[in-house]
Amino acid sequence: MTRYLDLFAGAGGLSEGFKMAGFDPVAHVEMDQAACNTLRTRVAYYWLKDHDMLSVYDAYLKGEISRRNFYGKIPAEELNSVLEYTISQNNIQDIFSVVHDRLHGNKLDLIIGGPPCQAYSLAGRARSRDHMVGDARNYLYKLYAEFLREFQPRYFVFENVVGLLSAKERGGERYFDKMRLLFKDYGYTTEYRILNAHDYGVLQNRKRIILIGKLNGEHGFYPLIPKTDTSAYRVHDILDDLPFIHSGEGIPGPVATKNHASSYLFKVKIKEYQTEPVTEHYSRPNNEQDLKIYRIAVQKWNESHDRLSYRELPTELRSHKNITAFLDRFKVVAGDLPFSHTVVAHLSKDGHYYIHPDIRQNRSITPREAARIQTFPDNFYFEGNSARGSQTQAYKQIGNAVPVYLAYSIAQAMKSCFENPEGYQRDREESRKDGVEENLFSNQVNTHYKDPT
């Protein structure tokens, strides 16, 4: 199997796609405790599945055994693949040592992952440009590069927000340029595309940079990532088979779904079988004022396909004096459209930007609904820091994740690079642009590049 290392893993959306495509994870490196618990639980799921012991997983989800007892049934070697580290110069050698031990003398083929996107996001810079310019997270790519230098994988897949393309240092140099130059110094040719998850089977508008590096490669290597046609589906195909609940209702544990799941859920591997239960389908409670606003927002959308502006609310429903700052505060997940707006981690703060389209339910979306929009399988469980899952932590992990089916599409393309190095299908049209860009890139190196290390 093709071995990969998962850096800045989060809840494992990117890794899940590669695992589904047949890649073999050596280790997942993540600093967040709750996300690490999610990763461990997923590692446990796959081990139990391989050993025909999923009844143990089911018992855990039902609350019949504790997390401690659940993990106690899994070999430590498996659970120890999750490395709970904040990657830094202080501990990077320790991480190297653990990964080498886990490789057992084998070669690492691939590194996947990208540093936290908040440092490069347009939204973050809009809130505080000066703070974001000085954010130490902007330079985590240097540590990523150290993993490339240490393990020399044949390829790496680096994911991040589109804002990375325009993020600049105080001196005006783009982080993205310096990043690629550093990767080049370490022997990697890089090419990138801006991919919208909606083109790859995800019913969500979500654009991301996917930068791929090849060791000692020549330009024109970027694999063709086949698109997935979802034109026959709408967002309600994600939602309609889930139990009807109101605000504050539902449970974290398993519940049955209705027996009319859309074929979309099987097409993108969210469901394995029709009667498969779901977990974490429980809605956060809302006060009466929020519920009145939600009803107005959904009604306006249903009648005119218009979003609710904060200034349109009756005065008694406005709790903020600065109206202009909250114009787009309430947004309905449009069930009748081919894709949703982007799911982000702010969902962990409140659900105002993700109102369920069914006015009868009158609530924000649940963690399971958000996870489905991100194409996480229904059998994927999101953990918290405590002994049981956390709704807030689940929302955060889901919002920060790479959509699983987008990751799977990328992984399938990368699989062909490894299995058929000379004959795999390349993204020829876009690669012609890479040649032009590389000439500009090389000129930039010669004129003003300074070693970022």
Image (cartoon, rainbow, N blue to C red):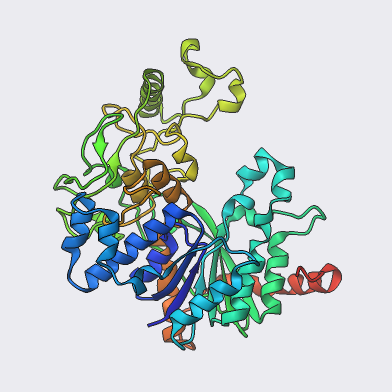
Residue 22 in sight:
yes
Q: Could you tell me residue 6's position as x and y percent?
A: 48, 68
Question: Image height check: is 259 above or below 213?
Answer: above
Q: Is residue 430 left or right of residue 453?
A: left
Q: Is residue 238 above or below residue 51?
A: above
Report x, y in % for residue 399: 45, 48
* Residue 198 visible in the current orientation: no
Q: Quadrant of the C terminus?
A: bottom right
The number of numbered discs placed on residues in the rendered structure image is 0
Of 131 and 301, the residue lying toward us? 131
Quadrant of the image occupied by residue 138: bottom right
Is residue 203 placed above or below 362 in the rendered structure? below
Residue situated furthest top in the rendering: 316
Q: Closest to the observer: 35 or 283? A: 35
* Residue located 37% across and 83% down the image: 1
Classify residue 419 by image quadrant: bottom left
Residue 344 in picture, x, y percent from top left: 48, 45
Q: Is residue 421 left or right of residue 69?
A: right
Residue 54, image quadrant: bottom left
* Residue pictured at 41% horizontal, 81% vertical: 2
**Left or right placement of residue 33 versus residue 146 in this view:** left
